[in-house]
Amino acid sequence: MTATERQYPNRFPILDVQPTIASGARAIKAVEGEAFDIRATVFREGHDALGVTMVLIEADGSEHPVRATMTRQDRWSARVRPALIGSAAFVVEAWDDPWGTWHHAAGLKVPAGVDVELELLEGSNLIERALGSTLLNAPAEAREAARAAIAALRDTSGDPQQRLTVAFDPVLDRAMHDFPVRDLVARSPRFPVKVERRRALVGSWYEFFPRSEGSDGVHSGTFATAAKRLPAVAAMGFDVVYLPPIHPIGVTHRKGPNNSLTPAAGDPGSPWAVGGAAGGHDAVHPDLGTLADFDAFVTETRRLGMEVALDLALQASPDHPWVRSHPEWFKRRADGTIAYAENPPKKYQDIYPMFFDEDPEGLYAEVERIVRFWMAHGVRIFRVDNPHTKPVWMWERLIAAINATDPDVIFLAEAFTRPAMMRVLGEVGFQQSYTYFTWRNDKAGLEEYLRELSGPAAAYMRPNFFPNTPDILHEFLQVSGPAGFAIRATLAATMVPTYGIYAGFELYEGTAVRPGSEEYLDSEKYQYRPRDWAAAEAEGRSLAPYLTLLNRIRREHPALQTLRDITFHETDNDSLIAYSRRDHDDVVLTICTLDPRVPAHGTVRLDLPALGLDWDAAVRAEDLVSGNVWTWSREAYVELDPFRAVAHVIAIGRA
C-alpha cells in the first residue's frame, strides 16, 4: 500500500489463500530466486471492477506488489520470486478499480449516447488524479498519453467517440493497469514464507562409505583415502557428498555380513550402531582418522565445489557413553532391559532408540549441542536418520533454533513412512525429504505422485529422489540390468530439482540378499565394500558417463531446477512417459521409456501452450543426450531402444 491509500481491512472478501500451511500458522517454503504462484478467491458486490495485488514482503521488509490476473471466476493468481534469504511473507490486497469500472462503462455508454459528457468528464478527472499520483512512476510516454487523453476528453467541441478513442490509447491503458489508482484497499493477514539458500531445493547427491574407499576388504579406509574418491565424484557433477555415520561403532550385538548375528573378529559393524569406547556422536571412528582428518576431508570437498552432508542418527549402540551416563534417555522393558530398535520383521539388536519423554529438555539440549558441534567442523547439511521415530516437537524446535543463527543449514528427512508424518516433518522445518519415488515405477504412479509433489505439497515438502539407498534395493533394479539403472537415473534427475544415488549404482549393483528382499547381498552396512572404479569405467561397465551428462544438463537448464510446475504430455504407449518443466524461456521435455527390456515406440501429443508455444507452432526439439535436432508439431513419433538410449531429454524452442 502507498502512503496515500486508506485501508479497509474487511471491505472485500479474500478467501482460500494459497500456498499456506495451517492457514498461515507455519511458513511455506521457497528458496532465493524461486518463483511461486500466490492464489486467492477474491470478489465484490455489484458490477464495479475489482483489482487484486499479491504483495511479496522480502526479508528486509521491502514490499514488491504484483498485479494478479483472474484465472477463473473469482480466482486470482500472480507469480512472485523472492530474492533474499530469511523470513519473508506475502499478503493479498483487494481494491476498488476505478479505471476498470470507468473503462467498461464508458465503452458501453458513449457509443450508446448515454450520459456522454458526464462519462467523459469523470474519465478525465480520473486520469488527472492518476497523473498526479500513480503515473508519476510510469514511463514518460504514458504520462504524455495521459495529458493528451485529458485534453481530448475535456474538448466538448470534438466528436465523443473520437475523444474516447484518445483516452483508450493502449499505452495509457497499460500504464493505468501497471500503476493503478486504488480505492477501498483491503489487505489479508500476512502469510509467512521461509526463504532459504538454493541448495535446499537444487542439488545432486552422492552417498558413499568412507571406510570402503581405500579398503582392501579387511581393513578400513580412512578420510584420507576417501578423499581420493572426491575428484571423480566432482567430475560426475555432484554437488553434495553424503556420509553415513562416521562415529565409533559398538561391539555389543554387532552385526556381521548380511546382517548376521555372528560377526567375525574383524567385522566392522553397522555405522548406525553409534557409540563405543572411543566416544559417541561427537567423535569419529578411530579407523577413519581424527577430527583433523575429517576437517581436511571437508576442506577438500569444498575445494572441488561440493559440500558434505553428514548423517544425524539419534540412536545408540549398547556401548554408547549415553547408556551409562543418561539411562533416562532410553526406554526400558518390563524385565529392565533397554528396548532395541525394531521394524518387524527386521530386528536391530545393536541399536537402542532414544526416548524423549523422561528428560526431554536434557536430551534436546544434547541433540542441539551435537548438531552445532559438527556445524563448527564445516557441516551445513544433515541427513536425519528415521526422524519419524522421534517427537515432532523436537524437530520443530531444533530446526528453528539452528536456522535462527545459521539459516544456511539444511536438514533432510530420511522418512519412508505415513504420508501424514512426512507432511508434518516438512511443515515443521525439514528442508528436504526422501520420498516414495523408489516404489513408483509405472506411468500412472509416477504421474500421480509428481503432480502431488509439484502441486500443493511443494509448499511444505521438497523431494529428494534416490533410486537406491544402502537400505533399499528395489526389485526393478534387481531384474532390469544397466537399462533399468539408466531409466531410474533419468527420472530422478529430470523429475525434481534434487536427486541422489548411493555408490555402486553407477556399477549396476543389483543383487539382493534373497528373492523378495530389498536388502543388498553383502550389504555395505555390515562390511567393507571396495570397488575398482577405474576398471569398471575402462571396461564400459559404468553409468558414470551418463550421470555426468545428466548432471551437466541439470546445471545448464534452469527448467530442471524448478519443482512447482510439471506438465505431463499424453502418450499412446504406457511404456513411454513424457513430461516438461519450464522456467521463463528455458523449457525441457523429457521422454523416457519405462521398460528396460524391449524397445518402446509411440506418439507423444504435446501440450504446446505448456511449452510456451502456440498450438500451430513448429517445434525445434534438440535432444541433449544424442545431439539430434528435430522439427516437430503437436504430435511426435518416438522410438526408444533401452539398449542404446533410454530417454530423449529435449531443449524446446520455436522452429
Image (spheres, helix red, strand yellow):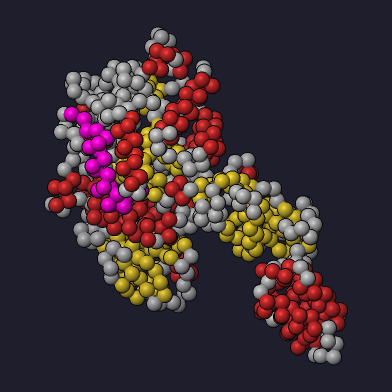
Reply above or below: 132 against 74.
below
Residue 57: percent from the left, percent from the top? 63, 52
Reply above or below: 171 against 276.
below
Q: Which of the 4 quarters of the picture holds residue 339?
A: top left
Going by the image, does 449 lie left or right of 263? right
Reply above or below: 504 against 639.
above
Question: Can residue 359 be seen in the rendering of this structure?
Answer: yes
Question: Can residue 270 be seen in the rendering of this structure?
Answer: no
User: As rendered, which of 182 and 521 lies closer to the eye?
Assistant: 182
User: As rendered, which of 622 and 515 lies closer to the eye?
Assistant: 622
Going by the image, does 568 lie left or right of 25? left
Where the N terminus falls, by quadrant? bottom right
Q: Is residue 94 magenta?
A: no
Residue found 60% across the figure and 55% down from its top: 38
User: As rendered, which of 45 and 250 lies closer to the eye?
Assistant: 250
Residue found 54% across the figure and 34% down from its top: 401
Residues in magenta, as a range: 219-239
